Image (cartoon, helix red, strand yellow):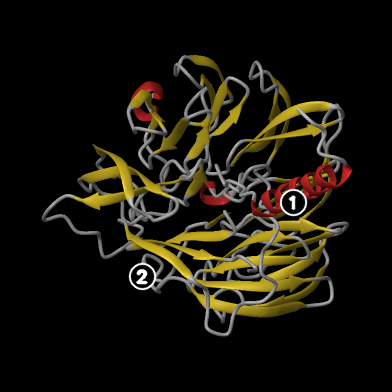
């Protein structure tokens, strides 16, 4: 074959380079689990808009779904979600706190990412015995061609992500002889190597690891009167991987491979009403936790027992200091903490001592409301906040102020369990888009810059 000469080769190389650049720019990033690919609430895709268009976001699709608090997971060109349907002639109780027996079903549904079309669904009978019984809580975890789901009454499923066929299943209530927690099983499972790590309940079985492919139990650990609701997290402290399990009686570190307890830091008193909910956050050798009544705790963790850096002085839902978050996972960046507090006060605190720098109700309910809420996801130098009002907000968060750059309404807040309309489901960010659901539909809207 004759040599085409230097110019055609240079042109070919240039075209190849341009094609590679375009491909890199267009490369999508999945959101396959709670808080995204790295389980840290950071969206790392490029090509994302810096301001909202005057006419609002381009809605790619909307698909009807049933009620639930479960957030969507997005992976491999598919969207996975859980929802619930009540049985005929069954109605939700007037008092959302009430615990009775509500017949109905839970469903795992898989949608085509490009269109929102339902590809498959798996439905099973599930009588609810929990408070705030709208639907499932847990975001699906997608890994290695499987999707793992946990229902509000403790049914753990491993399904084939392509077909929805059940690979294996477990039932926490039957297996461990426990009742569902007041607000249902809510801790998002974690895949680590060949393990699926879950928060269950009971004596010796608060944390349980299963083989992700077979469902075989690998180990179980810890005892507590209540398991709480916080997800398991793995962080490295002192050069060692530590599985953080936070339940109402203590925060614990386990060896992820064996379940052996590395250290335990007891709470005194216990976290009230079992409300260990927000995800524990690591910053270097620090571990930050926050809860609705008991407030905040900052630990310094090394190879041995952790030490308390600071903690809230008040146990209260109204007379708060530091941060008393009910369910939002705080954003911690550049030495500062950003999160809603107990009545929707979106606060900025210094990480070093918990000192409050400012607060505003703008991104939550707009005024003081019990459990006023917004989810926070960082993207580059800005943050996307998904308010309980159904608004997606673009903001710049700094120690000086909350600077709102724009907001759009994505969904109507149709769930009225707390006595007002709310959307309490964490959105997903992938494919330069946002995916969010309420109790009637899931919406996908483009956040692409072009």
Please state which of residues 77 and 300 is positioned toward the viewer in this rendering.
Answer: 77
Whole-percent x and y of residue 17?
78, 48
Please state which of residues 149 and 344 is positioned toward the viewer in this rendering.
Answer: 149
Side of 196 relative to 61 (left or right): right
**In the rendered image, which quarter is residue 262 located in?**
top right
Residue at the far front in the pictured view = 2
Q: Quadrant of the C terminus?
A: bottom right
**In the rendered image, which quarter is residue 374 located in?**
bottom right
Q: Is residue 341 visible?
A: no
Please state which of residues 133 and 177 is positioned toward the viewer in this rendering.
Answer: 133
Relative to 260, say whether 200 is above or below.
below
The secondary element bearing badge 1 is classed as helix
Number of numbered discs present? 2
Residue 21 tag number: 1
Whole-percent x and y of residue 128?
28, 45
Q: Are marks 2 and 1 in contact (CB under 8 Å)?
A: no
Q: Quadrant of the N terminus?
A: top right
Relative to 300, say whether 93 is above or below.
below
What residue do we see at 64% from left, 49% from top? 27
Q: Is residue 83 visible?
A: yes
Whole-percent x and y of residue 217?
49, 16
**Neighbours of disc 1 within 10 Å: few (<14), some (14-19), many (20+):** few
**On the image, numbered disc 2 is attached to which residue?**
414
């Amino acid at each position: 074959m004759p040599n085409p000469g230097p110019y055609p080769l240079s042109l070919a190389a240039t075209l190849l380079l341009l094609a590679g650049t375009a491909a890199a720019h267009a490369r999508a990033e999945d959101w396959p689990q709670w808080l995204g690919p790295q389980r840290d609430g950071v969206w790392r895709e490029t090509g994302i808009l810096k301001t909202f268009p005057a006419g609002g976001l381009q809605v790619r699709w909307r698909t009807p779904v049933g009620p639930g608090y479960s957030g969507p997971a997005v992976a491999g060109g598919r969207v996975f979600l859980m929802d619930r349907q009540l049985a005929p002639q069954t109605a939700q109780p007037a008092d959302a706190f009430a615990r009775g027996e509500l017949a109905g079903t839970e469903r795992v549904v898989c949608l085509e990412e490009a269109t929102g079309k339902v590809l498959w669904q798996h439905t099973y009978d599930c009588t609810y015995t929990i408070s705030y019984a709208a639907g499932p809580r847990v975001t699906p975890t997608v890994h290695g061609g499987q999707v793992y789901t946990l229902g509000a009454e403790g049914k753990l499923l491993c399904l084939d992500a392509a077909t929805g066929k059940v690979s294996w299943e477990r039932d926490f209530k039957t297996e461990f002889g426990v009742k569902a927690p007041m607000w249902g099983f809510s801790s998002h499972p974690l895949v680590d190597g060949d393990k699926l790590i879950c928060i269950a309940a009971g004596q010796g079985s608060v944390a349980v690891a299963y083989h992700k492919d077979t469902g075989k139990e690998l180990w179980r650990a810890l005892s507590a009167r209540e398991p709480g609701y916080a997800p398991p997290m793995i962080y490295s402290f002192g050069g060692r991987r530590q599985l953080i399990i936070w339940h109402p009686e203590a925060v614990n570190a386990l060896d992820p491979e064996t379940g052996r307890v590395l250290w335990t830091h007891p709470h005194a008193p216990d976290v009230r009403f079992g409300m260990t909910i927000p995800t524990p956050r690591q910053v270097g050798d620090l571990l930050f936790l926050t809860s609705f009544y008991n407030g905040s705790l900052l630990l310094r963790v090394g190879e041995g027992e952790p030490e308390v850096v600071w903690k809230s002085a008040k146990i209260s839902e109204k007379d708060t200091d530091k941060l008393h978050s009910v369910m939002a996972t705080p954003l911690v960046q550049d030495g500062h903490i950003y999160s809603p507090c107990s009545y929707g006060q979106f606060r900025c605190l210094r990480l070093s001592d918990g000192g409050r720098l400012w607060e505003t109700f703008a991104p939550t309910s707009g005024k003081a409301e019990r459990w006023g809420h917004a989810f926070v996801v960082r993207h580059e130098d800005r943050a996307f906040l998904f308010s309980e009002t159904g608004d997606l907000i673009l903001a710049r968060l700094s120690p000086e102020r909350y600077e709102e750059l724009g907001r759009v309404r994505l969904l109507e807040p149709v769930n009225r369990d707390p006595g007002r309309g709310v959307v309490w489901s964490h959105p997903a960010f992938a494919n330069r888009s946002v995916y969010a659901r309420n109790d009637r539909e899931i919406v996908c809207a483009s956040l692409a810059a072009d």
